């Protein structure tokens, strides 16, 4: 199987799924593509720069539950979700095409899938077929979930008097789910603990479905 196709196929599936959920007023494809590219390059660059800083300032024990908690939430969760949040907040959200709450989900997913595409290419070309298949059903959907939860609140923020509050809630919720998912995977030296990552994914899927449905029902173009 072509590794490039394997790496990008789940990204395309997520994008098509969310795009089709935008029932009442589709976003400009060019703008969606720009958000994808910004996620693929700018978000990755931001993450890389912050990660280099952490590499020089934090030395974490791979077998310490507390230190892996710090790694999951602070090093990975905050860094990656903040790098995506910046693009949605300062590029997508101010745009006039961002004209209903669901657009928060749509643009957040595009940025996140851009980031996930770059990340997935590295992992799949390094790890091969098994890595690609595993990530297609775990890491890529996880990035989509984090984006939907963040985008739900960023969509509310655009049309609220409490924009800062809702934007930060979206960012923090994405960080919490990202951190939780990674934490249970990082402490794989604890037997059976990986099930926590699975539970986190299932809960995230359930909340994401509710978020999508809620914004669909409140569309200004319905």
Image: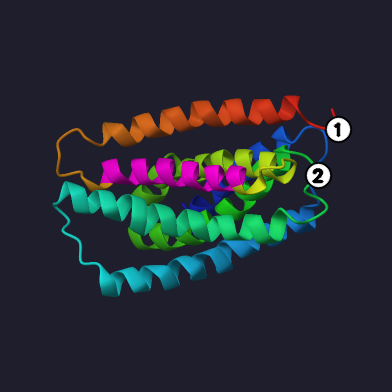
- Residue interval drawn in magenta: 165-185
What residue is pinned by disc 1? 221
Residue at coordinates 29% horizontally, 45% vertically from top-left?
183
Mark 1 surroundings: few (<14), some (14-19) or many (≥20) residues within 10 A: few
Relative to residue 159, is residue 130 drawn left or right? left
Q: Is residue 216 above or below residue 92?
A: above
Residue 121 in view (yes/no): yes
Query: In x, y percent, where is residue 75?
Result: 35, 59
Say which mark, if any, is on residue 135.
Answer: none
Residue at coordinates 63% horizontally, 51% vertically from top-left?
110
Residue 128 in view (yes/no): no
Q: What element does badge 2 sit on? A: loop
Quadrant occupied by the C terminus: top right
Residue 194 placement: quadrant: top left
Give the residue at the far front of this rendering. 161
Residue at coordinates 51% horizontally, 61% vertically from top-left?
118
Residue at coordinates 61% horizontally, 30% vertically from top-left?
211
* Residue 189 painted magenta: no
Query: In x, y percent, where is residue 191?
Result: 14, 36
Display coloring: rainbow
Relative to residue 211, is residue 161 drawn left or right? right
Q: What element does badge 1 sit on? A: loop
Report, in whole angstroms, how far the alpha carbon at label 2 lies from the one at label 1. Answer: 10 Å
Q: Looking at this view, is 61 or 1 the one in front?
A: 61
Secondary structure mostly taken by the magenta-highlighted segment of the chain:
helix
* Residue 180 painted magenta: yes
What residue is pinned by disc 2? 99
Relative to residue 70, is residue 135 drawn left or right? right
């Amino acid at each position: 199987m072509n590794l490039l196709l394997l790496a990008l196929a789940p990204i395309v599936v997520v994008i098509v799924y969310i795009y089709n959920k935008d029932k009442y007023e589709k976003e400009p494809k060019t703008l969606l593509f720009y958000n994808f590219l910004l996620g693929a390059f700018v978000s990755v660059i931001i993450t890389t720069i912050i990660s280099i800083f952490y590499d020089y300032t934090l030395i974490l024990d791979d077998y310490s539950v507390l230190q892996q908690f710090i790694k999951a939430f602070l090093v990975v969760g905050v860094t990656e979700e903040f790098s995506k949040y910046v693009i949605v907040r300062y590029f997508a959200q101010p745009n006039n095409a961002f004209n209903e709450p669901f657009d928060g989900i749509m643009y957040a997913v595009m940025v996140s899938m851009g980031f996930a595409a770059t990340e997935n290419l590295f992992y799949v070309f390094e790890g091969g077929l098994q890595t690609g298949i595993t990530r297609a059903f775990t890491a890529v959907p996880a990035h989509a979930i984090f984006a939907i939860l963040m985008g739900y609140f960023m969509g509310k923020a655009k049309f609220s008097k409490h924009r800062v509050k809702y934007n930060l809630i979206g960012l923090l919720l994405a960080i919490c789910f990202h951190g939780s998912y990674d934490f249970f995977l990082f402490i794989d030296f604890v037997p059976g603990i990986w099930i926590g990552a699975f539970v986190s994914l299932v809960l995230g899927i359930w909340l994401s479905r509710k978020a999508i449905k809620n914004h669909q029902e409140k569309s200004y173009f319905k």
